[in-house]
Amino acid sequence: MTLALSIVSHGHGAQVLSLLALLVQSPQSLIRRVWVTLNTPEPALTQALAAPDAAWRGRLDVRVLHNPQPLGFGANHNQAFGHEQQQSAPSPFFVVMNPDITWSQDPWAAMLQAAQQPGVGCVYPQQVDAHGQPQDHARRLPTPGALLQRYLGGGARRRARVAAPDWANAALLLFHSAAYQRIQGFDEAYHMYCEDVDICLRLQLAGYRLAEAQGACVVHAGQRASRRQWRHLGWHLRSLWRLWHSPAYRQFQQDHARRVG
């Protein structure tokens, strides 16, 4: 079983290079290809990726995509998935990964093991911040009431572990390629927020399960820009409005109500 990884850089050149250096240390038998999308021009990163003496040269199959115009989160990963599917031997697993992800223990074997469970369409690792504190990366359905409670609640409440989450954030997600293709990947109409909620709901509505990979833990320091920048807050609210009025959200709510009713 092998992985195709998708990483998007929007001015994240240094982080992308650090991540590639980390991936070189992963079992090479598990990683088939790494797609790096440059969402905006980055001459220094372009030069580094083309360098013949790059640390990953000959060890990782790194493919670089250059966007003439910036694309959104979902569109970028869908584009990489499309390129992967055009290969003569596409990977059976597709990984969406933020460039600021790191780890001390390689997560891929544990994530692939979790992906072998019956009915699983998407796998997520545990996430901690730079200080080792658990992140609230896997959550219940974001209803208006739940979000209000979350933002008024405290840090301890926000980091509470959810045993059976409805969605997991897309900082690092491993998909069965067949499942990703069946639901046509991310909904590109979302911008910056809620793409991960939507795709997790649609996967489950299509009959797949989400699974946490026991033993896989990564470091991710969430930006939480919507709490500090008005523009991001606007994007977040518009994405939430779209999510709450989407057929997937309404159907998931109805299915949940029937299960607990």
Image (cartoon, rainbow, N blue to C red):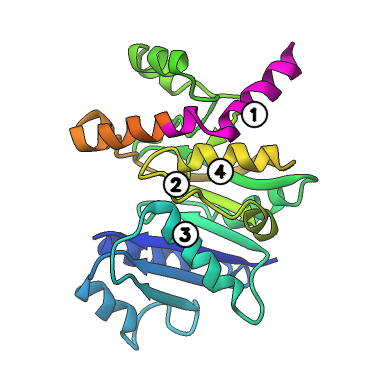
Return the residue at label 2. 171
Q: Nearer the viewer, mark 4 or mark 1?
A: 1
Q: Which residues are magenta?
A: 242-261
Residue drawn at x 37%, y 61% is: 8
- Residue 199, numbered circle: 4
| 91 to 247, vertically: above or below | below
Q: Earlier in the sequence, mark 4 or mark 1?
A: 4
Side of 60 relative to 222 (left or right): right
Q: Residues within 10 Å of mark 4 (few under 14, many from 20)?
A: many
Quarter of the image with the N terminus in it: bottom right
Q: Earlier in the sequence, mark 3 or mark 2?
A: 3
Q: Earlier in the sequence, mark 4 or mark 3?
A: 3
Amino acid type indicated by mark 4: Ile
Side of 31 relative to 229 (left or right): right
Q: Nearer the viewer, mark 3 or mark 2?
A: 3
Q: CA distance from mark 4 to mark 1?
A: 13 Å
- Residue 251, numbered circle: 1
